Structures are given as structure tokens and as C-alpha cells.
Amino acid sequence: MAKPATILIKLLSTADTGCFYVAKKNPRKTTEKLQFRKYDWVKREHVIFKETKIK
């Protein structure tokens, strides 16, 4: 079987609260690191979430 095109990544909060989201990414099409503005439920406001690897 062929290797899947998408990988799972972790979107970690830049507010240092430990909150994270899990997302899928196609590394063949999107080579740069993802960055989204999402809701941080510990800080209770929208902050930047940056891509990191899932360990």
C-alpha cells in the first residue's frame, strides 16, 4: 500500500498555556509551517497557534 499523503500535526498555543489542537496537513503541497488564530480555552481568548510535531 502507498504511504498516506497527509500527516497529523499539533498546533500549540503561543500563550504558553499548554493548549493544543490536532490537525491534518499535506506536506507535499504545504511545505511551510502552519499558523492559525484559534481559541485558547485556558486564557479564554483567541491567540496564535503554531505547528509542532506530535511526539
Image (spheres, grey):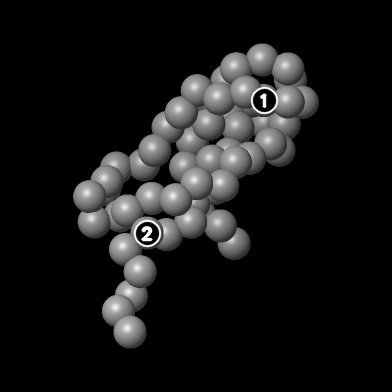
Q: Residues within 10 Å of mark 2 (few under 14, many from 20)?
A: few
Q: Quadrant of the N terminus?
A: bottom left
Q: Amino acid at mark 1?
A: Asp
Verify CB contact (< 8 Å) between mark 1 and mark 2: no
Residue 31 in the image, given as x and y percentages of width and height: 26, 48
Q: CA distance from mark 1 to mark 2?
A: 25 Å
Q: Amino acid at mark 2?
A: Thr
Q: Quadrant of the C terminus?
A: bottom right
33 lies above or below 9: above
User: In the image shown, does 24 or 27 lie closer to the viewer?
Assistant: 24
User: Can I make out residue 52 in this image?
Assistant: no
Residue 9 in the image, given as x and y percentages of width and height: 49, 51
Q: Residues within 10 Å of mark 1 (few under 14, many from 20)?
A: many
Q: Residue furthest top?
A: 45
- Quadrant of residue 39 within the rendered picture: top right
Residue drawn at 32 percent across, 63 percent down: 5
Q: Residue furthest front?
A: 1
Sequence order check, earlier mark of 1 and 2: 2
Task: Point out which mark residue 40 bears.
Answer: 1
42 lies above or below 34: above
Q: Is residue 12 left or right of residue 19?
A: left
Tell me the element at label 2: loop
Residue drawn at 50 percent across, 23 percent down: 37
Residue 54 in the image, given as x and y percentages of width and height: 56, 57
34 lies above or below 42: below
Q: Is residue 44 left or right of residue 38?
A: right
- Quadrant of residue 20 within the rendered picture: top right
User: In the image shown, does 12 or 25 lie closer to the viewer?
Assistant: 25
The residue singled out by tag 2 in the image is 6
Q: Is residue 40 left or right of residue 51?
A: right
Tell me the element at label 1: strand
User: Can I make out residue 26 in this image?
Assistant: yes
